[in-house]
Amino acid sequence: METTKLAQELATAKNLNENDNPFFVVNISDLIDRFNEWKAKLPRVQPFYAVKCNNDPVILWVLAHLGCGFDCASRAEMDMVLKKKMVKPENIVYANPCKTRSFVHHANQVGVRAMTFDNKEELAKIKEIHGNPHLLLRIGVSDTTAVCQLSTKYGCDPEKDGPKLLKLAKEMGLEVIGIAFHVGSGCRDPVSFRRALKAAKTLFDTGIEYGHNMGVLDIGGGFPGYDSEEITFDEIVNVINPALDEHFPASLNVKIIAEPGRFFATHPVSLVTNITSAVEVSAERITGKAEDAEKPGMMYYMNDGVYGSFNCIFFDHYHPKGAPLFEKKGELVDSTIWGPTCDGLDQVEVQTRLPRMAVGDWLLYHDMGAYTNVAASKFNGFEPPKTYYFVDKTKWALLSDNARFGA
């Protein structure tokens, strides 16, 4: 069943029950397809899903069952996957270079050993608190065109500081097991991976010279949630695979992991909202053009916005485009779409063109799984959308019978 068709069935049922609350639809079959695509195109790289991207428990469970590890950045994220026994501690990387002391203590207690660092102060903190850490040196090699750049906050200079930190770790009796990097969330320049892999190999060799057992390479995230004119997954794959073969050939027996988030979470999740008010205005108010003064325009108000699922507009620089869930005929009208709160900043679509909609109509937003509900608030008393899941029988058969949610 297609996502749109299921969303239509759910909306129809809600209409019968006078339920106009927004809702998510998660296509588990699509999630499984994304995992299979990853394994086919990056066969040497084990994904450690970035929990921060979308911590939905069903998404986490499915990915764990398929063979994902997890990139966790806090105590709560570690507990999400450990308390439900999704993975063992060795399949978690505590990928926060600047960690809370109590979280390091907790990682020690629950057996999470793999963790990143990028400064000497962090080494001292870890040395004091954790009994047996396996460290990954995080280096700063970035894509300046990435949607969310990370090297300004994390990652040491691979040439100036990397060797010094490897030497210091050895002198402190701390075990460095490999190198980690993150080119930036939403990478748009795949060549940045090649630069990062070259720098990582140099430090790998340096670490071995200092006596570290260098056996893990973490190539981070930056993989797109869907293909676009700016970047495709294949473009990145076509850079990474040859660079891995050049700098980290299979003969070295290096374990290669990555921290994809949006690659898995974005496409399987769609959001359906309900129009709560529909107000006709001059199109000039929407377009800003004097010649549109006598043309009709529409301002629509819906029951989810930037304080809820659409926080991605501010935090992730992502601007979703909605469409009528059910087919609408008629002339397209210049429109603005607002969220439900009383804040004037709560604007989801500044200018779009839609057929005339009415109160109670539903809007469908695809590709809404990354950095949306995970950062939503209840500002002004608006509750987050309920989530519905579906999977086709063939894909469901791939998952074990004894760990199903709600089955």
Image (cartoon, helix red, strand yellow):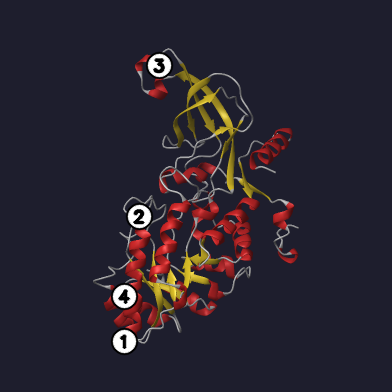
| Disc nearer the start of the sequence (2/1) | 2
Which residue matches tag 4?
121
Q: Quadrant of the N terminus?
A: top right
At x 70%, y 61%, the residue is 398
Any part of residue 331 in sight = yes
Residue at mark 2 to residue at mark 4: CA–CA distance: 23 Å
Which residue matches tag 1?
171
Which residue matches tag 2?
149
Residue at mark 4 to residue at mark 3: CA–CA distance: 60 Å
**Mark 1 secondary-structure assignment:** helix
Q: Pick the residue in front: 141 or 363.
A: 141
What is the three-letter code of the residue carrying label 1?
Answer: Glu
At x 39%, y 68%, the residue is 246
At x 35%, y 82%, the residue is 208
Any part of residue 222 in sight = no
What is the three-letter code of the residue carrying label 2?
Answer: Gln
Residue 367 position, x and y percent, is 54, 45
Residue 267 position, x and y percent, is 55, 48
Residue at mark 3 to residue at mark 2: CA–CA distance: 39 Å
| Disc nearer the start of the sequence (3/2) | 2
Number of other residues with Cα within 10 Å of mark 3, as a class: few under 14, some 14 to 19, many 20 or more: some
**Mark 3 secondary-structure assignment:** helix
Q: Quadrant of residue 176?
A: bottom left
Q: Are marks 4 and 3 in contact (CB under 8 Å)?
A: no
Which residue matches tag 3?
292
Q: Are marks 3 and 2 in contact (CB under 8 Å)?
A: no
